[in-house]
Image (spheres, helix red, strand yellow):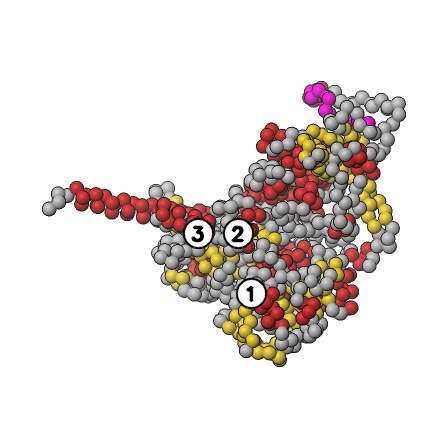
Amino acid sequence: MLTVAPPDAAEARCNATFEALMWSMARPGDVRELPEAGLTSIVEALIDRECVAYADSPDLSRQIADTGAVLGDPATADHLFLDRLEGASDALAGIRCGSALYPDDGATLVAQVAHGSGQRLRLTGPGIDGARDMALALPAEFWAMREQLCAYPEGFDLLLVDGRSVIGIPRSTQIEVL
Amino acid sequence: MTLAALTKPWAATSYGFLDASAKRELRRKMLKAIAVPGCQMPYASREVPMARGWGTGGLQVTLTLVNPQSTIKVIDQGADDGVNAASIRRFISRVSGAAETWDTLDASIVQSRHRVPEETMREDQILVLQVPNPEPLRGVEPNMSIARQMHADADYGRLWLTLYEQLVRKGRIMQGAAYPSLVNGRHVMTPSPIPRWDVPKLNMARHLTFLSAGREKRLHAVPPFTRVEPLVFSDRPYRVEDHADLVCRRSGIAGYFMNEIPQDSGGSVFEVSDSNLGIKAIRRAEGEAVEIGATWYENGEYSA
Amino acid sequence: MAYVATRGGEKAIEQAERLFRQDLGTIDAARVEAIRQSMPYLVDRVMGEASLYDEDMAALALAQTGGELSEAVLVLRAWRTTQPRLAVAAPLLQEDLLTVRRISAAFKDIPGGQILGPTLDYSHRVLATDVLEGKPYNPPSVDPAATAAPMRQPSLADWQRQQGLVAPANDSTVAPDDIPDLTREPLLFPASRAHRLQSLARAETGGVLALGYAAMRGYGNAHPTVNELRLAEAEVMVRHPSGTEFSAGRVRVCQAEVTSKEKGGFLELGFAASFGWNEVKVIAAATLDLNSAEAPVGSPVHEEFYLSHTESVEASGFCIHFKLPHYVTFQSVLDAMRDAKAKAAAAKANQDVAVERQTEPAE
C-alpha cells in the first residue's frame, strides 16, 4: 500500500540507472541496460554537491556543475566522466586510488567505450564464476596502467558505457589481456 | 541556477522516504562496497523513522534499491511475522508501493536480521542484512581508528589469537553467531549475527548481499561468486550448529536451523527457524500445491 | 495454519501503538502551541539534539511522543533528514549575536560588561505549591535598567588574543560553503574540528553532562573556567542565487568557551555551541572539547569515546534494541557451549580412566 506519491520520472530513472550500475559492478563483464544512452543518467543518479567530479565534455561539465558538485581535475575528482579514453592516459595517471585505510576514496571512472570489439580480455575475481572472456575497445596501454595503479584494495572502478549498455569492472577484477 | 531549480513541490515524504541526496550517497557507497568486497565503507547514515539498532542500516539500503516493481520479504530471526519484521515490511511497502511477500522465491529483496533464508537465493535476488556491529575486530580492539588501521594492514593476528585461545581453553572455538570471515582473501568481515549455519550460504553465492549498520554508519557487501571463508585452523574444521538431526515439531521437516523451545516438563522441542519454509511444508503436507525451492542444506548437509 | 496464528506480529504491533497513542489523547494545534509557549527550554533541547530549528515541529514532536525525549528527537531528526538543503548559512561571529546573557567567570568584569539576563542561577529552587491550591503564580515584572545593555557584545577571546593571552585564531582556509557537514557525511576519527563541534551541538544533553562531569571530576586533565557563556539570538544569513544576502530569520543559540591552564604560553580554549538555550550542555561540551587534545585513547574525554557515546539517537536506539528477540544468536551460543561442555566431560572421563590405569599395580 503506497502512501506517498509514486516515483516521478527522475526518481524512476535514477533507480533504474543504479540498478544497472550495481549489477554491472557485482557481475564484472555482464552487460546491463541503462534507461538512457550515454553518461547523463549516471551523473544524475550519483552526483551531487557532496562530490568532486571531472568531465571531458562541456555538456557534462555543465550538468555536473548544476548538481552543485565541485568541478575538479582528473587527480582530485571522485568521479570522472570521459567521452574518450584515447589520449587520456596522462590525465588518468594521477587518478585517485584511495588508501588502504579508506579504499572508498578510490575514484569511479565512467567512460564511453565500445563493447565487443578491441582487445580480448579474460576477467577473473569476485562476481565471476570462474573466468569470463570479452572484448573491449580501450587504449592498448590502459590495462598496464590500471595494473600499476591498483594495489588492491586501493584502486579505481570502471563503468564502461556503450550506448545504453554498461559493463562494470571493479578494482577487484583481475584482467588478463589475451 | 535559481532557487526554484533546487527545490521541488512540497511533499510530506519523498518516494522511498529518503531524499534524493541521501539515495545518491548510498548508491555511491554501495558501488564502492561491491568493488572492495567485505571492506567497511563509511556513510552518513541518515535518520529514518525507526530507532537506531532496529534495522536502520538495512532499511536505508533497501529504500535505495526499492521501486514499485520490487517484492519485499523482511524477516527477523527467520520469521516474517516477528514484530519488528512486520513493522519494517509495512514501512517499506507504504513508502515505495513494493509488493510484500513471505516467500523467499517471490522476493526481489530480502531484508533480514540474524538469518539467511534456507531456500537458495537466485542471481536476481538481493539479500540485505541488518548489522548491529560491523567491526569484527571490536572484541579485540574497541577503538575504531586503530581497528581501521588493522584492516588496512590486514593485521588480523589478534583475532586469530583469540580464536586459538578459545581452542586451547575450551577445546573449540566459542564464537556463536557473527563468525568472522575472510572475504576475497583480503578483508575480514562480520557476516552480521547470522548463525554459523548461514555463513557458507554467502560463499560463492549466486545472489548479492549488502550488510549495513545504520547506527555505526558502515556498509559492506559480498558480491556473487566471492570467497567468504570463516577463520578456522586447518586442523580444526569450521563447524555449524549441531542442528542437522533436529526435527520441526510443527512441520515435521528436518535438517535446517531450528529454534529451541523449552518445555515445562524439562527438555526442549524444536521449530524450524525459517518460518515460511515451515509454513510451506505444512501447506504442502495438507495437499496444497506449494513450491518449495532448492535449499542450501540437504538432509542437514551443506551442498553448494 | 496454527503455525501463523500463534504469532500474529502485525496485529500486535498495531494495537500496542494504539494503546500508547490512546493514552495521550487528541493532539491538536492548541496542545502543540501550549507546549511551544510553556516549555521553551525543553523545545530548545529537542531542537538542539535534533539539529533542526523549528519550534513548532519540535513542540509537535514532544506532543506526539508524550514528552519521551529520545523519541521526540528521533521523530524530529527523521523528518529533518528528508528535507532538501537549499543553502548554507553564513558563519556567525560572536560580536554579531543579539546577546541577552553573557557572563565570564574568568574576570570580575569584562569589556562590554557582565550581563546576567534571564537565569534561575541565583533563585531559590522552591516549588510554587500554591499553584496546585488554585492560586496562580504571576511573575513579578522586571524593572528596566537605567541604561539598556548593548544588543551586541564583543568577544572576550578577541580581547584575550589582543593581550597575547590566547593563541591567535587560525584563519580557516575552508570556504563557508565547504564546511564539512556531519549530517551528510560520516564521523571519522580523528574528527575534523567542524565535525567534533557539530557532533557536540547535537549530542544528548544528559550524555554530554555525564562525560563532561567526568572530565571535571578528574577523568580529564583540565578543570574548566567559564571564559564566556552566551545566550543570544542570531540572524541566519543566506545568499540568494541572485547574489543578495538576506536574513532568513532568527534562531536562539547558546555558546560556551571554557579555559584552563596555560599551554605553549597561551590559555587553551574549549568551545561548544548549540541551537536553543541549553547552558549545562554547552559548558559540559566545551569542557570535553578542551580536554580532547591530550586525552588518552579509550578514556572518556577522548573524542572518539565521547562523540560515539553521546549521539542521542544512536545511543537510545541501541539501548532499546536489546528488547528485540535475539534467540537465533542465543541458540548459536548455546550450541557452542553445550559442545564445549560435552568435550570437557569426555576429556575428564578419559583423564579419570587414565588415572585409574595408573593406580593399577604395575606388573
Identify the residue position indicated by label 2 in the image.
Answer: B150
Q: Residues within 10 Å of mark 2 (few under 14, many from 20)?
A: some
Q: CA separation, marks 3 and 2?
A: 13 Å
Q: Is residue B68 left or right of residue B6?
A: left
Which amino acid type is marked by label 2? Met
Say which label, 3 or 2, has the lower sequence index. 2
Q: What is the chain letter for disc 3?
A: B
Q: CA separation, marks 1 and 2?
A: 20 Å
- Decide: is B227 above or below C272: below
Q: Which residues are magenta?
A: C113-129
Picture residue at 10% right of the left edge, 46% below the top: C363
Picture residue at 68% right of the left edge, 72% below the top: A85
Disc number for residue A172: 1
Which amino acid type is marked by label 1? Ser
Specify the quadrant of the image occupied by residue B240. Answer: bottom left
Asked if labels 3 and 2 share a chain, the reply is: yes
